[in-house]
Image: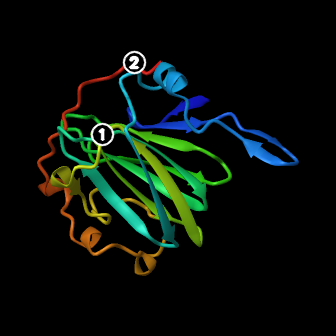
Amino acid sequence: MEVIKTKIEGPLIIEPRVFGDNRGYFFESYNAREFAEKVDSSIVFVQDNQSYSTYGVVRGLHFQRPPHAQAKLVRVIQGRVMDVAVDIRKGSPTYGQYVSVELTGENHRQFFIPKGFAHGFVVLSETALFQYKCDNLYEPSSEDALAWNDADIAIDWQVPAHLINLSEKDKHHGLLKDYDSPFVYEGTKNLE
């Protein structure tokens, strides 16, 4: 697998080696040893989740507060999404900034989102099947989120606002400027 750094320290794009021929394709979507060597040896994924969504659905910007914070490894099995990670680590030089990556069933890219980032995605295709691994179990009491349309973050969701489809819960999240983040930037990490 190839690991690609993004403009923000922490989130990484992962491109697996895909073997294809006239029958289709094969690739390892996750290899614990290679992930530990190339990304983070402290991560142990304990929960897999999957969602199915239609065009314009925005899921996010979600995270769990410590001590139940989650790092995530996400990918699209079918369809096309724009996936987003927002830096919410106090003291980070990129606090409040986001990085996005297009994930599709064809490009097989994966996106690693470490703890200290709010995460969300928007479906750009008619439908999308989205899968992700988490390194901590879901804990409802630690669940938190930011508004998908926070003007200070200014995410270009690539879908007209009137076509955005949100859950009732995701319509009522607060703004980053009003949030006292429990995450603290710990300086540059060697990800080589």
Q: Amino acid at mark 1?
A: Asn
- Residue 83 location (% of width, % of height): 46, 53
On the image, numbered disc 1 is attached to which residue? Answer: 136
**Is 8 left or right of 143, judged from the image as shown?**
right
Say above or below: 81 vs 188.
below
Tell me which label, 2 or 1, sits earlier in the chain: 1
**Is 153 left or right of 77, judged from the image as shown?**
left
**Residue lying at 41% horizontally and 81% vertically, measured from the top left:** 162
Per the rendering, the mark at residue 68 is none
Q: Amino acid at mark 2?
A: Asn
Say above or below: 27 vs 75.
above
**Residue lying at 35% horizontally and 73% vertically, measured from the top left:** 166
Q: Residues within 10 Å of mark 2 (few under 14, many from 20)?
A: few
Extreme residue toward the right, this view: 22
Q: Relative to the observer, which residue lies in front, 89 or 151?
A: 89
Instruction: Classify residue 28 by image quadrant.
Output: top right
- Residue 3 location (% of width, % of height): 55, 30
SS of the residue under disc 2: loop
SS of the residue under disc 1: loop
- Residue 92 location (% of width, % of height): 25, 34
Q: Residues within 10 Å of mark 1 (few under 14, many from 20)?
A: some
On the image, numbered disc 2 is attached to which residue? Answer: 190
Extreme residue toward the bottom, this view: 162
Real-space CA distance between mark 2 and mark 1, rounded to the nearest whole angstrom: 23 Å
